[in-house]
Amino acid sequence: DTEVTQTPKHLVMGMTNKKSLKCEQHMGHRAMYWYKQKAKKPPELMFVYSYEKLSINESVPSRFSPECPNSSLLNLHLHALQPEDSALYLCASSQGFPTGGYEQYFGPGTRLTVT
Amino acid sequence: GESVGLHLPTLSVQEGDNSIINCAYSNSASDYFIWYKQESGKGPQFIIDIRSNMDKRQGQRVTVLLNKTVKHLSLQIAATQPGDSAVYFCAESSKGAQKLVFGQGTRLTINP
């Protein structure tokens, strides 16, 4: 099983809402990632988790709050978002870090629209 | 800052022809390179990767070439098919880094 799953596929939320994005992998990968992708742009790294601990936060605003409850799950909690946060949110996982030659497997993404 | 970029934002080829997608990088410490394909509405899909101790690596219908002297990476797709239509991203990682840095992407379109 080389699949990363993400739910929901689409999400529309107001600026005062609280919602969560979920990501799951069962490949035994120890590194998990959140990316944000705007239209016609490359994915931008937001967070990296290594062995369930946050190892990189790319200066992401606090209205985005990641959580790694266990080695298979990664959540992204959203609160008080802005319309400019509308984007495709991608989750990825890898057996190790790129420096070790480990590719990242991406999920299909959650298309988020903030109204 | 470091960046990974592409020479052409769009590439249009005839079905059956070979496609070459180029990528320039600026980080001399880059030691791992990877190509992803992203179809509309989907997440990026791994195509092929290469370490800096190699110049060339081949997969099924794809070849990646690395020229460290001029910091250039290319992806060659043989006998391009309609299913190859997508945006292609190169990405790189430096020794010891925990993350990939993505290039801007090239949209490949196939003419029948």
Image: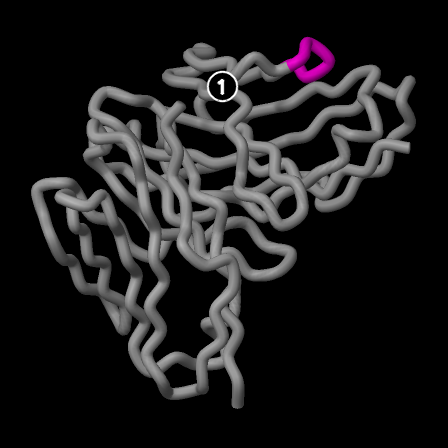
On the image, numbered disc 1 is attached to which residue? A70
Q: Does A101 lie within the magenta span?
A: no
Taking depth in this image into account, of B86 and A100 the one nearest to the observer is B86
Q: Which residues are magenta?
A: A61-65
Q: Is residue A100 left or right of residue B78?
A: left
Query: Which residue of the protein is positioned furthest toward the left in this rendering?
Result: B53
Residue B22 drawn at (x, y percent): 34, 57
Instruction: Output the chain of dot 1.
Output: A
Residue A16 drawn at (x, y percent): 91, 18
Image point (43%, 51%), residue name: B89
Q: Is residue B63 above or below residue B13?
A: above
Q: Is residue B94 left or right of residue A109?
A: left
What predominant SS class does the magenta segment belong to?
loop
Q: Is residue A1 visible?
A: no
- Colour scheme in use: one colour
Q: Is residue B4 visible?
A: yes
What amino acid does circle 1 point to? Asn
- Disc 1 crowd rating (10 Å Cα; few below 14, some 14-19, many 20+) is few
Image point (51%, 20%), residue name: A47
**Screen quadrant of the N terminus of chain B:** top left
Q: Is residue A20 above or below residue B53?
A: above
Instruction: Count numbered badges in the picture.
Output: 1
Image point (48%, 43%), residue name: A106
Residue B74 drawn at (x, y percent): 28, 58
Residue B44 drawn at (x, y percent): 49, 50
Image point (21%, 30%), residue name: B28
Taking depth in this image into account, of A28 and B51 the one nearest to the observer is B51
Q: Is residue A34 above or below residue B106?
A: above
Taking depth in this image into account, of B109 and A102 the one nearest to the observer is B109
